[in-house]
């Protein structure tokens, strides 16, 4: 418990000033009764301050956020528990929880007397539109004497943190097919080890060989069942995040870098649902030495919550780590900003002949403004992304007039994956949010 200086209340200071005045006046004019009354009046605040100082707060404060993982713009309920570890009951406390400003207003509440060994719980809600690690606490408590003459302030318990993760957009339920070449061709199989049962039966899935249908189990279960004689190996994917601060737009919740972080988090969650071994190559995973091994989506998204823009040299370092990650095969997805070509030159070397790759090139200048998406870049198949602006609204109006049904178009707030994408793959047309996971699964944007 961090102590703060004890102070007299306005009432206590008034009593003290009046008492000193009466004492001086009584001594000057020779009124002993007035002097005794002034001494009593001046002594009351001092006695109250002494009684307040006797209270020793031995409290333990714990905080439990629900849910445990919170995304941007999602509310979280924090259960604050105050437990008394001292030998005497605690006084009535007027408490204020210290929070980072992005979490909202500081909650204030009253905590009644807490007996020895017992606890009290208070719940409040926080919400943040900025991802990252934010501070909860310490708990600032205030208590005083029964007459309201003296008060005491104390910081109770230690501060804790809450991690606000980037928003993860659902990318559909489409799976990943083995449509590549070489190491990314038909999915290989691993034979069971000695002593393990090679034969098992499972439900039929799209793409299973019909020659593996187990007709006996199908008749018994009432649905199509297949023999699983081997264990399929997991496919590999490398997801790279461009960290260059000079290539992205100005910082803020609507910046291109925040869009990139949300996109990488959504892709990693989609790959995990497709049972794909994903390698996240970001500045945080490189510093944590996790870029060279498969990573779970939850762990990667926790690291993305604290991702910050870096220098141009950081992209070159990420490319070097990505070279090692794709050494055993796999397709590549890079989310980059349209900075200088010199900064993006190293990305082209990641893609090997016959290896699928996809680059999401962001038109960072249009984020937070109304503008049109930029064109595609040579090298990889790419999709250029920009926020919905005037061009999208005017196109919708012209299309409505051509059909003879003039409709009122009200601009809505779009999530990152609801924004319009334009692709440089010939005449494929715009790639919408629902189309991206399907094309990733079907291999359309990954073919060369």
Image: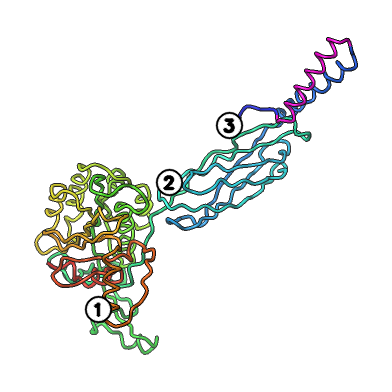
- The numbered mark, 3 or 1, whose residue comes first in the sequence reads 3
> Which mark, residue 188?
none
- The numbered mark, 1 or 2, whose residue comes first in the sequence reads 2
Task: Specify the segment rendered in magenta.
Answer: 9-30
User: At which x and y percent is residue 374?
Assistant: 19, 59
Circle 3 or circle 1, nearest the eye: 3
Image height of 203 relative to 431, above or below: below
Q: Residue at x 24, y 54 (%)?
A: 240
> Which mark, residue 133?
2
Q: What is the distance, in whole Å, between disc 3 and disc 2 at their CAs? A: 23 Å
Q: Which residue is mark 1?
A: 207
**For residue 154, what is the image quadrant?**
top right
User: At which x and y percent is residue 357?
Assistant: 17, 62
436 displayed left or right of 147? left
Was residue 388 drawn as part of the magenta stretch in this picture?
A: no
User: At which x and y percent is residue 180?
Assistant: 16, 68
- Quarter of the figure with the C terminus: bottom left
Q: Residue at x 14, y 54 (%)?
A: 350
Q: Which residue is mark 3?
A: 2
Image height of 33 relative to 102, above or below: above
351 displayed left or right of 39? left
21 displayed left or right of 124? right
């Amino acid at each position: 418990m961090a102590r703060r200086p004890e102070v007299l209340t306005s009432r206590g200071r008034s009593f003290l000033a009046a008492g000193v005045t009466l004492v001086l006046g009584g001594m000057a004019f020779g009124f002993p009764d007035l002097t005794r009354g002034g001494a009593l009046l001046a002594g009351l605040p001092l006695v109250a301050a002494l009684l307040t100082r006797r209270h020793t707060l031995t409290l333990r404060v714990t905080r439990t956020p629900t849910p445990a993982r919170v995304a941007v713009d999602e509310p979280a309920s924090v259960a604050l528990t105050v437990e008394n570890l001292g030998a005497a009951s605690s006084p009535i406390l007027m408490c204020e929880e210290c929070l980072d400003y992005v979490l909202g207003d500081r909650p204030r509440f009253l905590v009644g007397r807490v007996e020895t060994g017992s606890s009290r719980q208070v719940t409040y809600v926080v919400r943040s539109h900025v991802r990252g690690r934010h501070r909860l606490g310490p708990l600032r408590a205030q208590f005083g004497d029964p007459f309201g003459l003296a008060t005491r302030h104390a910081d109770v318990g230690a501060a804790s943190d809450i991690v606000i993760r980037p928003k993860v957009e659902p990318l559909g339920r489409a799976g990943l097919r083995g449509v590549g070449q070489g190491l990314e061709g038909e999915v290989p199989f691993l034979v069971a080890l000695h002593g393990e049962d090679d034969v098992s039966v499972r439900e039929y899935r799209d793409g299973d060989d019909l020659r593996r249908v187990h007709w006996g189990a199908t008749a018994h279960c009432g649905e199509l069942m297949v023999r699983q004689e081997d264990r399929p190996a997991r496919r590999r994917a490398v997801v790279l995040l461009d960290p260059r601060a000079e290539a992205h737009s100005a910082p803020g919740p609507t910046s291109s870098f925040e869009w990139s972080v949300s996109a990488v988090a959504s892709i990693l969650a989609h790959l995990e649902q497709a049972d794909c071994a994903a390698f996240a190559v970001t500045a945080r995973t490189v510093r944590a030495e996790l870029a060279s091994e498969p990573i779970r989506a939850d762990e990667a998204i926790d690291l993305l919550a604290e991702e910050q823009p870096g220098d141009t040299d950081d992209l070159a370092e990420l490319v070097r780590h990505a070279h090692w990650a794709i050494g055993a095969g796999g397709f590549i997805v890079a989310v980059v900003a349209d900075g200088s070509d010199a900064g993006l030159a190293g990305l082209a070397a990641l893609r090997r002949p016959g290896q699928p790759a996809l680059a999401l090139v962001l038109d960072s200048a249009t984020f937070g403004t109304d503008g049109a998406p930029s064109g595609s870049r040579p090298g990889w198949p790419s999709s250029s992304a920009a926020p919905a602006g005037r061009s999208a609204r005017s196109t919708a109006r012209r299309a409505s007039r051509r059909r003879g049904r003039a409709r009122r178009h009200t601009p809505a707030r779009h999530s990152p994956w609801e924004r319009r994408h334009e692709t440089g793959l010939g005449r494929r047309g715009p790639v919408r949010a629902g189309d991206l996971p399907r094309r990733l699964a079907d291999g359309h944007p990954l073919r060369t």
